Amino acid sequence: MPDYDGMLALERMERAVEKVRDRLLRSTAALEAAGIPYAVIGGNAVMAWVEQVDESAVRFTQDVDIVLRREDLGRAAAALATVGFLHRHAAGLEMFLDGPEAKARDAVHVIFAGEKVRPDYVAAVPDTAESVSFKAYRVLSLEALVRMKLTSNRDKDKMHVRDMLAIGLIDASWPARYPPELATRLQHLIDTPDG
C-alpha cells in the first residue's frame, strides 16, 4: 500500500520547485526581452553551475535572487510588470512579488551591483557584467558567485561552497583568486569539508 502522506508531500515539493522555476524563467525572460542587464545569483546560480557537473548534487532553492544595477530598477519594474510581477520596497529590500496576493518568499529579490549588502562586508556585489549565459538566462560567473558566497558567509553560503568543492567545480587552487579575508574563508571550507 503506497504511503499517501509521503506522496502528498512529494507532490507539494514538486509544485514548489516548479513555482520557483517558473518565477525564474518568467522574470529573466522579461529582463532579457527588455535588454536589462541582470544576473541570477543565490541558490539558482549555484544550481546552474552544479548541474553542469553533477545533476544529483543539485539542491533546490525556495526563492529567486538577481543582481541589477540600481539605475535599471525602474526599467526592470516595468519589464517585470508585463509578466505579472509587482515592485515592492519593504524593510530596505527591493523585490518583485509574483502577483498581488504573493508573499515575500514568492518574489524575485533584488541585490544591487557594485554595492555592499552590509557595510561590514569585505566585497561589494559583483556587476552584472560578471555574468555568463546559462540556458535561457544569465548567472554570475563562477568566480564572482563564489566571491559573493564567501562574502556573505552564512551557513547556507558555506554549504553551497562545500557542494561546489565536493564535485570538483572549484578546488584548492581557488583561494589565490580572492583577497586575504575571503581566501582564508575558502581555505577553511577546503580544510573542513564536513563542516
Image (cartoon, rainbow, N blue to C red):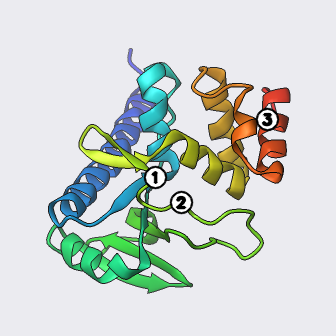
Mark 1 against mark 3, which lies toward the viewer? 1
Residue pointed to by mark 3: 189
Disc 1 crowd rating (10 Å Cα; few below 14, some 14-19, many 20+) is some
Residue 101 against residue 54 in the figure, above or below:
below
Q: Residue at x 64, y 49 (%)?
A: 147
Residue at which label 2 appears:
126
Q: Position of residue 106 (x, y in %)?
A: 38, 63
Residue 167 or residue 173, whichever sits in front: 173
Q: Amino acid at mark 1?
A: Glu
C-alpha distance separating marks 2 and 3: 22 Å
Please give the name of the residue rendered at 56% of the width and 84% of the height, measured from the top-left corner.
Answer: 91
| Residues marked 2 and 1 touching at CB (< 8 Å) | yes
Upstream in the sequence, badge 1 or badge 3?
Answer: 1
Tag 3, which secondary structure? helix
Camera sees residue 100 = no
Residue 130 is marked as 1
The amino acid marked with disc number 2 is Pro
Q: Name the secondary structure under disc 1.
A: loop
Residue type pointed to by label 3: Leu
